[in-house]
Amino acid sequence: MTAGKAPTATFASVIPRTGIGIDVHAYAPRDAPQPLWLGGLFWDGEPGLAGHSDGDPVAHAAADALFSACGIGDLGTHFGTDRPEYAGASGVTLLAEAARIVRAGGFEIGNIAVQFVANRPKFGPRREESQRVLSSAAGAPVSVSATTSDRLGFTGRGEGISAVATALVYPAVPAAPHPAAPQASG
Ligand SMILES: [Zn+2]
């Protein structure tokens, strides 16, 4: 082996992992309306979704995809009844905590892509804002797109919003051991 092949070997040892997450929330009943939180943003005047938290399917799907990519369970595993402090947490908070858990588990985040399916709200004008908020929470690029289901299914009938996310993570490369290094101090 020549010295020139070393970088190839280094890259080969870092294999990225993909993950997927799906989240769905129904609209809150008319007699118990909720504010709409979607893509980490508050949507004034829009009908809101039901949920134990802010019901943000975009943020939840993103967090779920992170856990999926690392193979460490799902939203229920990490934010279930045994962690009541997250019972009413915002989607952005959950995404930030998911990213922290993933990094504590030895992974770095490449990116997260989310697409949600809904008749409304009109997302394009606030896409950049949403991506900024979610990317800041995850500490990695999060892209968000929106589509409709051509009036078919529960999203087409306006009964709820679904979101699907993919995430790419990779093992964080540990610092090369240095036999001559003294014990860490400070
Ligand atoms: Zn959710």
Image (cartoon, helix red, strand yellow):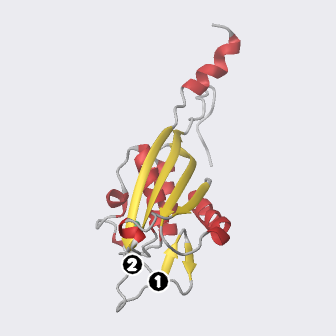
Q: Position of residue 67 (x, y in %)?
A: 42, 51
- Apparent side of residue 121 relative to residue 70 in the rendered image (left or right): right
Of 120 and 90, nearer the camera is 120
Residue extending farthest to the right is 4
Q: Is residue 122 visible?
A: yes
Question: What amino acid type should be assigned to the residue bearing mark 2?
Answer: Tyr
Residue extending farthest to the left is 81
Residue, disc 2: 27
Q: Position of residue 42 (x, y in %)?
A: 56, 79
Q: Position of residue 132 (x, y in %)?
A: 65, 64
How busy is the neighbourhood of tag 1: few (under 14 within 10 Å), some, or many (20 plus)? Answer: some
Residue, disc 1: 47
Please, what secondary structure does the residue beneath circle 2 have? loop
Above or below: residue 185 compared with residue 45:
above
How busy is the neighbourhood of tag 2: few (under 14 within 10 Å), some, or many (20 plus)? Answer: some
Q: Position of residue 163 (x, y in %)?
A: 45, 61
